[in-house]
């Protein structure tokens, strides 16, 4: 077999594995949303998670599509949420455990409204630890 | 889930049928490469010369034995210089116990590099003639060990690629298979989460000891707390607690209980989620898991890395489609569609499992296609030397300077 044609076959095969990401248009960059839809995307890892992570900066009032688990609800942000930060998917009560990855990542320091930014101001770890030799 | 593989006389099943050349010291690397180039046998570059102490020597020998007895390997040529600290005969004997053909060639006793090379080519070709070219038996996913690793991560690794691999890990474990997680440094601080995951009290306690060991090592080898604590950079990036940060990494192993903890390069005897004690360096970590019998590696990456192994497919999973495009030669599959909202994590997890079954049936990973292989073993003495240096500094001891 000709080396080039073998390479083409392998390339096509690799492309098929990834539903044609290469041919979908590299120039569009990272996110390839339909331009007419006005929403931001946040990822929920497990069905039981109370928070999702913003893939881009979200402003208060903007619509947010929750992806990752397939339930795909559209919620509205009530505060600004920076890229990579968490948004509450439902209201969370004071001292309630906050779940991400299906596990407890911390406790709520205040009542948290659905759509609000969840971070160090309203969520703390279980116990602050020190280095073993300190 | 079934596949066609290579049944070994010890009962294990391989998904590849490689002839492996093991150079037992770096001095014979070039002879090994030469034999490999002329025969198509696989080999790796030995990263070190002679070793300094017993522990290090045992780790080195055991990593080689692990590669030799690996079910993806059908026959082995042990290539020795003759005077190295690693015992070539111990390595060859241990591999012979599996019943596969093993040849031992000592360069100092075979006429030097050129004559040894010629002799090696002959012996390799003779063994290759006896290797099956087609799969010999049907295997089940429950017989497979899958290693999990991440390297060159980015902000999305913990959100797309790692959770997608976690979904795949759950499918593999539910089908009776085994996944091996390591990177213990990432677990420091997440003890509470991991404690609940241990299947027995002993596993819980052993895991806590292992994490403590790494915490102490980190405390004497670095002044930077960012690996142990949540750092200002992490917080700015959106990570709120140490549990959340650690889960981004350990979630690769899915949600099932931890059934066993093994040493570096040790083969798991239990099926399910297994933790291996490996260093944070991804190449040495992958090498240890393959030495421990991993048939295939899921390697998640944010920015992309070419790494591969001489005997097992290393499947690179990118966290975003941009990296898939910019590192197309290296990335096997992208979890980036999750970021774009067009696929769920479960769907990507299922794609990973179907890719795993294709590769178990012989389809090559990109690293195998391009003949990319890396090999590293932990230099265990480094930590001890660091401890020594630290103590010397504390004692303000200038004995050797005077």
Image (cartoon, coloured by chain):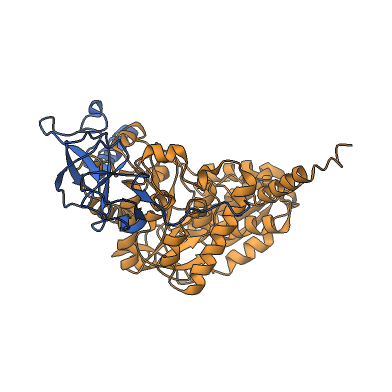
Q: Which quadrant holds residue B64?
A: bottom right
Camera-side residue of B92 and A104: A104
Farthest residue in the right direction? B402
Residue that appears at 61% across and 48% down: B219
Q: Which chain is blue?
A: A
Q: Is residue A101 left or right of residue B233?
A: left
Camera-side residue of B97 and B313: B313
Q: Is residue B66 left or right of residue A112?
A: right
Task: Confirm whether residue B101 shows in the render.
Answer: no
Above or below A44: residue B135: below
* Residue B68 place in picture, x, y as percent: 55, 59
Above or below B159: residue B105: below
* Residue B159 place in picture, x, y as percent: 32, 46
The quadrant of the picture occupied by the N terminus of chain A is top left
* Residue B9 place in picture, x, y as percent: 48, 71
Task: Confirm whether residue A35 shows in the render.
Answer: yes
* Residue B71 place in picture, x, y as percent: 47, 62
Q: Which quadrant holds residue B301?
A: top left
Residue that appears at 25% across and 41% down: B339
Which colour denotes chain B?
A: orange
């Amino acid at each position: 077999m000709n080396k080039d044609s073998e390479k083409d076959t392998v390339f096509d095969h690799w492309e098929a594995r990834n539903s044609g990401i290469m041919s979908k248009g590299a120039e569009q960059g990272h996110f390839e949303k339909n331009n007419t839809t006005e929403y931001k995307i946040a990822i929920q890892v497990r069905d039981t998670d109370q928070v999702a992570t913003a893939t881009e900066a979200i402003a208060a009032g903007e619509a947010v599509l929750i992806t990752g688990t397939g339930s795909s609800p559209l919620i509205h942000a009530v505060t600004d949420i920076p890229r990579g930060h968490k948004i509450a998917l439902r209201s969370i009560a004071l001292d309630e455990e906050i779940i991400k990855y299906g596990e407890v990542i911390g406790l709520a320091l205040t009542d948290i409204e659905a759509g609000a930014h969840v971070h160090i101001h309203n969520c703390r770890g279980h116990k602050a630890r020190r280095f073993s030799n300190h | 889930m079934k596949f066609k593989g290579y049944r070994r006389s010890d009962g294990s099943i391989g998904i590849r049928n490689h002839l492996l050349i093991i150079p037992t010291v770096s001095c014979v690397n070039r002879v090994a490469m030469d034999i490999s180039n002329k025969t198509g046998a696989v080999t790796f570059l030995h990263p070190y010369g002679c070793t300094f102490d017993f522990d290090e020597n045992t780790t080195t020998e055991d990593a080689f034995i692990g590669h030799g007895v690996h079910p993806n390997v059908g026959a082995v040529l042990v290539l020795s210089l003759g005077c190295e600290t690693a015992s070539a005969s111990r390595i060859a004997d241990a591999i012979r116990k599996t019943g596969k053909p093993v040849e031992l060639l000592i360069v100092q006793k075979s006429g030097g590099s050129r004559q040894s090379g010629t002799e090696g080519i002959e012996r390799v070709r003779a063994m290759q003639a006896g290797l099956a070219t087609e799969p010999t038996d049907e295997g089940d996913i429950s017989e497979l060990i899958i290693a999990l690793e991440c390297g060159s991560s980015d902000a999305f690794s913990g959100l797309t690629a790692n959770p997608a691999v976690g979904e795949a890990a759950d499918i593999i474990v539910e089908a009776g298979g085994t996944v091996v997680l390591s990177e213990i440094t990432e677990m420091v601080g997440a003890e509470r989460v991991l404690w609940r995951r241990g299947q027995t009290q002993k596993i819980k306690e052993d895991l806590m000891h292992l994490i403590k060991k790494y915490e102490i090592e980190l405390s004497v080898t670095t002044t930077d707390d960012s690996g142990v604590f949540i750092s200002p950079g992490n917080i700015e990036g959106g990570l709120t607690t140490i549990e959340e940060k650690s889960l981004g990494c350990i979630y690769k192993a899915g949600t099932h209980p931890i059934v066993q903890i093994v040493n570096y390069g040790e083969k798991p005897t239990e099926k399910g989620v297994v933790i291996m004690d490996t260093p944070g360096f991804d190449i040495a970590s992958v090498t240890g898991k393959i030495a421990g019998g991993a048939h295939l590696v899921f390697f998640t990456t944010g920015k992309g890395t070419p790494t591969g192994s001489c005997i097992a497919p290393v499947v690179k999973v990118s966290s975003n489609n941009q990296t898939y495009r910019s590192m197309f030669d290296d990335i096997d599959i992208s979890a980036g569609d999750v970021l774009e909202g067009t696929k769920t994590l479960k769907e990507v997890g299922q794609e990973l499992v179907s890719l795993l079954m294709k590769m178990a049936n012989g389809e090559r990973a990109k690293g195998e296609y391009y003949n990319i292989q890396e090999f590293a073993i932990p230099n265990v003495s480094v930590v001890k030397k660091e401890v020594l240096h630290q103590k010397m500094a504390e004692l303000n001891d200038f004995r050797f300077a005077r």
